[in-house]
Image (cartoon, coloured by chain):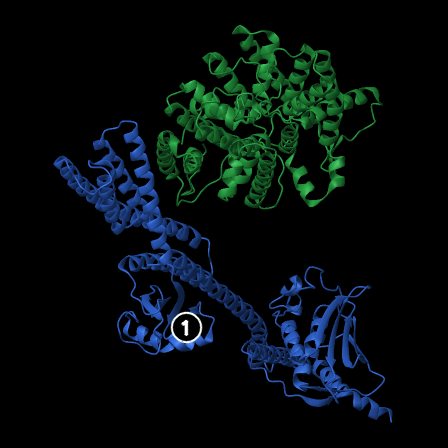
């Protein structure tokens, strides 16, 4: 016991005793009978007992009261003698009554303390369940419960959620502490029993570890760590902690359910996306296949009855469709590579002019009545790029331009040097892109509305692939509508250090 | 009492809280009852009276202890609106009743006489039913202690002992308008120590000029508290000493001065003091009325030296609401002198002092209010004026509401004055005597023409007790407290 408490108790005892004696003295001066004086002392004993909250002080005060009664108020006065044997009996009764009162009041006080503690805990439980409803991060929940335990049980606490021997969530931020308790945590998890309750310990004596099962989680386990300094936790506190853990579990399980729900939602969105992709792809493959099938079967069945010119025209159609299919499959392949992050860019020094001529050659059979004008740069440009991919981008863009413009229209492709980068502009004089689509034109599966016609079919994956490829080259791609109608796509591919611009210099020499 | 059932509240609020606070006050007052017992060291022959102090002391310590069980060791809520007034009222009433117990227990005074004496003490009035020539020293000292506690303010003394976060509202509810230091407990201790210093100096001066030590300390306390209980039957007059009168005048002025003035005096801000509006008013009133009183005395046949001595002394005794006397009786003084005394007692001391009355600042504001009103009526409609008053060297803007509050306070005060005087007249006294006596009670002065005293009827005692009580607590706290209790008990009938 602290010395100050002892001092305080003795002072209270003394003061009350003096006051009671003073009152008793004055009362007897006023002529109050001596028997009643004892009642004042009974009151004093009670007050002392309530104030000091100690049985010992109560007993001492009872004895002192009896003595002072003897000394001051029984004949012969101011001695510890008693002349009248009646007073003997009175004093014995007084001491018995005082002791009875002592025990009763201390028991009452203990009960009051217990009920007050319970009240506080019920209150904190109520507050806790109310607050937990408003918390939505598992970490937040754990930190909050730490705080609740600190307030409710006066213990420093930490929380840990472990799933298949991997720590998923923890409130421990201190690595040192983590290392200290690691062994005991593993022991506790393996045996699923409290660590630190007995003499046995694994390097850590301060922390008591209490494991608990988390439902709805495969092999999910929770750990409550309490800094007890090796002291035993009382039954009452344990019950309180159990109740706290119960509330915690409800909150955590609710949180897990909501996380699962979120994941299901994402999964569903993905499925939806896949099925729409499949639908559009199968449509795009089906149409040229039908043409191929119709043309080839007609040729097989009536090869002799048709003229050579008609045969040639049909074969040309078949060739066109095959080329389209081949491009399409290329795109699809690239896309799946990009999706699964397996697109490997094999960069090599390429002369831009060669790339452009390759593109023109590729497109020559599809151009029809469109005119493609190439405006060259004033110097020879080298870029470091994967020729195949860049050609595909340019083919996609030009193909787009062909599809989306009227016959006989002019398509311009221009490349030039600007800001240490090689730029490609592809301009057409068609109807342009509608303003609400131009912002999303490079996103997945953006189909323009007039794409239903056979001539301008598309999957909507072309531009998305273009963007991915250009980004893989560290470049940029933009699209905008011209002032005079028609759209412009601009590609910027930066020169790598010591790269292609040197080529232009060489050409100048 | 609103009780929000959604929130689980463990705080103590409402009447249990008030009861708990009152309990702590009562414990405090119980210990206060023991203070006169110290005198037994010097006057052991008076030990027969000790029981009269011990019994109420212990009993009320116990009562207070039990009442304080409402709040001890619990989380305390806030006092709601007007509950502070209820608390201050209850504290004052219970203090007065408890402190009347020793008088009753001596067996020499009736209940009403005891309550009257106790009220007179705590309101620093000085009207008395005690025969000072035969009363024991303990009773005399006890009266002086009541003056000191009552003059400084019960709550103020309490907050200086126990620092409490709700003390501030009680502090202002008791009529201390200005906050001196940021820390309440510190400022109350400062106030107490400054008054303590004045009392010590006063006692020393009195002893030097030939008073006995016991008389000196009692008179010193009575003068600084502007109380006026004397240990001599004929008050200061019994010493027939000009130097004692001068010391008394100085002490009375100190007691009747705004506490801010003391603070600035100690800190040496003399310039701020000269500008302080109340000081100017005091000078003006002094120069106007004091000579007038002296002249009226000379006309009544006093020698010029006597006239100056009595005139100046009685002037300060009245305006500081102390109530010491050098004149043997006010029955034989000229009428104009008595009327002027009534006027002075109505005006009273400075705000924030230990004195009573309407208070000089209110009187000043009253006249300023009239002149401002007249000015506004005369000047152009669209012209706006700012109403300023000098408060301890700072110019403070006075709002219309404050002016109105001030008018209504003074009106109510004068109404009370008339009603009290009327009751005195009904009891068979002359109008002038009645006005003098009730102005003295209401202004907590204590000068008497003899209406109150040991042989006064209960009606007189009750009337003057109520007057002293209202005068000390400045009326409104009492009215607010009573109407709040009435509303809570009889109004909605919801008591928590």
Answer with left or right where residue A123 lies relative to residue B126: left
Q: Position of residue A244 (x, y in %)?
A: 35, 57
Quadrant of the rendered structure where residue A484 is?
Answer: bottom right
Q: Is residue B418 above or below residue B147?
A: above
Answer with left or right where residue A321 lies relative to residue A199: right
Colour applied to chain A? blue
Residue at image mark 1 = A167
Q: Is residue B125 above or below residue B273?
A: above
Residue sitting at x 33%, y 46%:
A14
Chain for mark 1?
Answer: A
- In the foreground, A443 or A238: A238
Looking at the image, the residue that sits furthest to the right is: A509
Mark 1, Cα crowd under 10 Å, few <14 / some 14-19 / many 20+, is few
Residue B308 visible within the image: yes
Residue B29 visible within the image: no
The N terminus of chain B, quarter of image: top left
Which chain is depicted green?
B
Q: Is residue B485 above or below residue A93?
A: above
Quadrant of the rendered structure where residue A165 is?
Answer: bottom left
Q: Position of residue A247 (x, y in %)?
A: 36, 56
Residue sitting at x 40%, y 27%:
B102
Quadrant of the rendered structure where residue A64 is?
Answer: top left
Residue sitting at x 63%, y 70%:
A458
């Amino acid at each position: 016991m602290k010395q100050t408490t002892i001092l305080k108790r003795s002072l209270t005892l003394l003061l009350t005793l003096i006051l009671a004696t003073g009152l008793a003295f004055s009362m007897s001066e006023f002529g109050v009978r001596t028997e009643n004086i004892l009642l004042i002392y009974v009151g004093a004993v009670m007050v002392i007992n309530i104030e000091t909250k100690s049985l010992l002080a109560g007993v001492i005060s009872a004895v002192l009261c009896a003595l002072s009664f003897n000394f001051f108020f029984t004949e012969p006065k101011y001695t510890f003698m008693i002349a009248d044997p009646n007073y003997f009996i009175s004093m014995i009764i007084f001491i018995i009554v005082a002791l009875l009162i002592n025990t009763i009041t201390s028991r009452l006080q203990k009960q009051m303390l217990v009920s007050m503690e319970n009240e506080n805990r019920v209150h904190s439980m109520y507050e806790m369940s109310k607050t937990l409803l408003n918390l939505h991060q598992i970490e937040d929940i754990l930190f909050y419960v730490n705080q609740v335990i600190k307030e409710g049980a006066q213990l420093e606490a930490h929380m840990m959620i472990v799933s298949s021997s991997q720590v998923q969530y923890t409130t421990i931020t201190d690595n040192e502490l983590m290392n200290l308790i690691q062994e005991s945590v593993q022991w506790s998890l393996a045996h699923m029993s409290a660590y630190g309750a007995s003499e046995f310990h694994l390097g850590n004596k301060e922390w008591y570890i209490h494991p608990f099962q988390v439902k709805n989680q495969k092999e999910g386990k929770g750990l409550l760590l309490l800094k007890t300094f090796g002291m035993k936790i009382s039954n009452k506190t344990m019950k309180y902690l159990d109740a706290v853990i119960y509330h915690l579990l409800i909150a955590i399980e609710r949180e897990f359910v909501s996380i699962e729900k979120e994941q299901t939602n994402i999964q569903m969105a993905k499925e939806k996306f896949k099925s729409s992709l499949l639908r559009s792809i199968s449509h795009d493959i089906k149409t040229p296949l039908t043409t191929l099938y119709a043309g080839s079967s007609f040729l097989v069945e009536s090869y002799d009855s048709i003229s050579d010119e008609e045969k040639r025209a049909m074969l040309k159609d078949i060739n066109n469709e095959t080329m389209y299919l081949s491009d399409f499959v290329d795109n699809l392949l690239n896309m799946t590579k990009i999706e699964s992050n397996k697109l490997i860019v094999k960069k090599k020094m390429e002369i831009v002019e060669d790339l452009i001529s390759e593109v023109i050659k590729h497109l020559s059979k599809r151009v029809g009545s469109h005119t493609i004008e190439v405006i060259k740069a004033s110097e020879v440009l080298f870029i470091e790029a994967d020729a195949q991919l860049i050609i595909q981008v340019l083919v996609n863009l030009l193909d787009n331009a062909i599809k989306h413009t009227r016959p006989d229209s002019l398509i311009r492709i221009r490349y030039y040097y600007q800001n240490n980068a090689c730029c490609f502009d592809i301009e057409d004089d068609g109807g342009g892109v509608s303003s609400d689509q131009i912002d999303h034109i490079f996103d997945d599966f953006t189909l323009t509305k007039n794409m239903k016609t056979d001539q301008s079919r598309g999957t909507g994956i072309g531009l998305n692939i273009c963007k991915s490829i250009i980004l893989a080259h560290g470049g940029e791609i933009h699209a905008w509508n011209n002032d005079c109608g028609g759209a412009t796509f601009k590609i910027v591919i930066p020169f790598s250090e010591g790269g292609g611009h040197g080529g232009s210099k060489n050409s100048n020499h | 009492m609103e009780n929000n059932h959604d929130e689980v509240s463990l705080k103590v609020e409402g009447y249990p809280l008030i009861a708990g606070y009152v309990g702590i006050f009562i414990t405090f007052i119980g210990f206060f009852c023991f203070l006169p017992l110290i005198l037994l060291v010097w006057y052991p022959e008076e030990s027969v009276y000790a029981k009269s102090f011990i019994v109420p002391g212990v009993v009320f310590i116990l009562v207070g202890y039990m009442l304080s069980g409402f709040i001890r060791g619990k989380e305390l809520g806030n006092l709601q609106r007007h509950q502070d007034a209820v608390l201050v009222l209850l504290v004052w009433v219970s203090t007065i009743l408890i402190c009347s117990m020793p008088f009753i227990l001596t067996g020499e005074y009736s209940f009403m006489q005891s309550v009257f004496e106790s009220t007179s003490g705590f309101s620093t009035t000085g009207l008395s039913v005690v025969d000072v020539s035969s009363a024991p020293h303990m009773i005399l000292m006890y009266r002086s202690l009541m003056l000191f506690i009552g003059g400084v303010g019960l709550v103020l003394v309490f907050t200086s002992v126990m620092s409490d976060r709700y003390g501030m509202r009680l502090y202002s509810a008791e009529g201390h308008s200005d906050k001196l230091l940021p820390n309440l407990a510190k400022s109350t201790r400062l106030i107490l120590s400054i008054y303590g210093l004045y009392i010590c100096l006063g006692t020393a001066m009195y002893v030097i000029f030939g008073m006995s030590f016991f008389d000196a300390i009692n008179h010193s306390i009575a003068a600084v508290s502007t109380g006026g209980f004397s240990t001599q039957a004929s008050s200061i007059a019994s010493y027939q000493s000009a130097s004692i009168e001068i010391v008394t005048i100085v002490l009375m002025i100190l007691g009747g001065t705004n506490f801010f003035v003391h603070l600035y005096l100690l800190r040496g801000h003399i310039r701020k003091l000269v500008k302080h509006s109340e000081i100017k008013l005091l000078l003006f009133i002094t120069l106007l009325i004091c000579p007038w009183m002296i002249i009226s005395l000379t006309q009544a046949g006093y020698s010029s030296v006597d006239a100056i001595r009595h005139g100046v002394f009685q002037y300060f005794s009245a305006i500081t609401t102390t109530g010491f006397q050098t004149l043997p009786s006010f029955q034989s003084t000229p009428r104009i002198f008595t009327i002027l005394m009534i006027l002075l007692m109505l005006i009273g001391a400075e705000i924030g002092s230990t004195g009573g009355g309407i208070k000089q600042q209110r009187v000043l504001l009253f006249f300023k209010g009239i002149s401002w009103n007249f000015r506004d009526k005369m000047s152009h409609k669209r012209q706006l004026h700012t109403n300023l008053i000098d408060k301890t060297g700072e110019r403070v803007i006075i709002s219309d509401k404050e002016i109105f509050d001030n008018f209504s306070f003074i009106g109510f005060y004068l109404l009370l004055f008339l009603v009290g005087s009327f009751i005195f007249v009904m009891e068979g006294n002359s109008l002038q005597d009645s006005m003098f006596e009730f102005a003295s009670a209401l202004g907590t002065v204590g000068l008497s023409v003899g209406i109150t005293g040991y042989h006064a009827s209960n009606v007189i005692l009750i009337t003057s007790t109520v007057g002293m009580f209202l005068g000390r607590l400045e009326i409104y706290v009492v009215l607010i407290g009573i109407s709040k209790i009435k509303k809570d008990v009889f109004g909605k009938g919801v008591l928590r």
